[in-house]
């Protein structure tokens, strides 16, 4: 039993390592609006998944620091990648189902500024996740979540599956 547990532990950490290091989003430059929107929704959900995993891990009695570092790193690498998720032509005018508001492309400076703020906080979170001060990490996760919400409130339509921060 002890050996089984150890094996499981190793494979989970190897998987986490792979997910954390490889850029898995890969939205090709010549992708159609349908493909871009499909991929970015999946990527936004991955970002949400890493956020929720980190939040839940921090609430545990004995959080695992290697998982905290892993999720912190995932959030930062998705955040980095997000700069490619909203290219010209991938808004609602494409006819595809998206909750992205058309203002992303007409008020681009504002969108980019909110994105830049989010990226700063996500990077801080990732750096902090190495420090093993879980109170500080939880506080920074909160700040990062507020940066997500700031962009969503301005540039995303709500739907029936709203992500809970
Ligand atoms: C700079 C703006 C911006 C930031 C920052 C941002 N998002 Fe989003 N997010 C969006 C937009 C716009 C959509 C709608 C995408 C669409 O429907 O095409 C979205 C969609 C989502 C979705 C729904 C995806 C689906 O299934 O349709 C989730 C979940 C999500 N975001 C989570 C997060 C989390 C968690 C963070 C922060 C850790 C975050 N987002 C940060 C703009 C942002």
Image (spheres, rainbow, N blue to C red):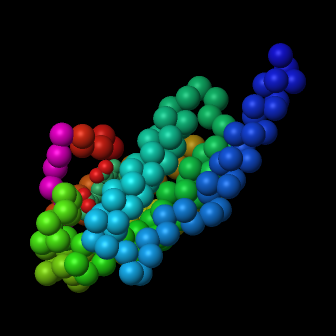
Identify the residue at horizontal 30%, vertical 43% (top origin). 163
Instruction: From the top left corner, tell me how far across and down residue 14 is, in percent.
Output: 74, 47
Q: Residue furthest top?
A: 1
Identify the residue at horizontal 75%, vertical 31% (top origin). 8
Query: Which quarter is ligand 1 in?
Result: bottom left
Instruction: From the top left corner, tell me how far across and down residue 93 is, in percent.
Output: 12, 72
Along the viewing direction, whichever of 94 and 85 lies nearer the viewer: 94
Above or below, comparing residue 49 to residue 25 in the picture: above
Above or below, comparing residue 155 to residue 3 in the picture: below
Along the viewing direction, whichever of 97 and 57 lies nearer the viewer: 97
Instruction: From the top left corner, tell me how far across and down residue 46 is, in percent.
Output: 45, 51
In this rendering, would 151 be left or right of 28? left
Identify the residue at horizontal 55%, vertical 29% (top origin). 60
The answer, for residue 165, to whether it is visible in the render is yes
In this rendering, would 158 be left or right of 85? left
Q: Is residue 124 magenta?
A: no
Specify start and end residues of the magenta stretch as a single range: 155-160
Quadrant in the rendering for residue 61: top right
Identify the residue at horizontal 39%, vertical 54% (top origin). 42
Name the magenta segment's main secondary structure: loop
* Placement of the N terminus among the 4 image quadrants: top right
Quadrant in the rendering for residue 6: top right
Number of disc labels = 0
Q: Is residue 156 magenta?
A: yes
* Placement of the C terminus among the 4 image quadrants: top left
Along the viewing direction, whichever of 56 and 138 lies nearer the viewer: 56
The answer, for residue 117, to whether it is visible in the render is no
């Amino acid at each position: 039993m002890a050996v089984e547990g150890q094996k499981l532990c190793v494979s989970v950490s190897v998987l986490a390592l792979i997910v954390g290091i490889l850029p898995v989003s890969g939205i090709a430059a010549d992708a159609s609006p349908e493909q871009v929107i499909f991929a970015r929704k999946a990527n936004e959900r991955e970002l949400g998944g890493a956020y929720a995993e980190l939040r839940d891990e921090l609430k545990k009695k004995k959080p695992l620091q290697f998982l905290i570092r892993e999720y912190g790193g995932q959030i930062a690498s998705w955040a980095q990648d997000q700069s490619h998720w909203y290219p010209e032509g991938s808004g609602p005018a494409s006819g595809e189902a998206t909750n992205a508001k058309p203002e992303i492309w007409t008020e681009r400076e504002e969108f980019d500024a909110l994105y830049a703020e989010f990226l700063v906080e996500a990077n801080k979170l990732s750096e902090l996740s190495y420090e093993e001060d879980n109170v500080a990490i939880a506080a920074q996760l909160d700040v990062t979540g507020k940066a997500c919400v700031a962009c969503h409130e301005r540039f995303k339509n709500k739907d029936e599956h709203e992500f809970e921060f």
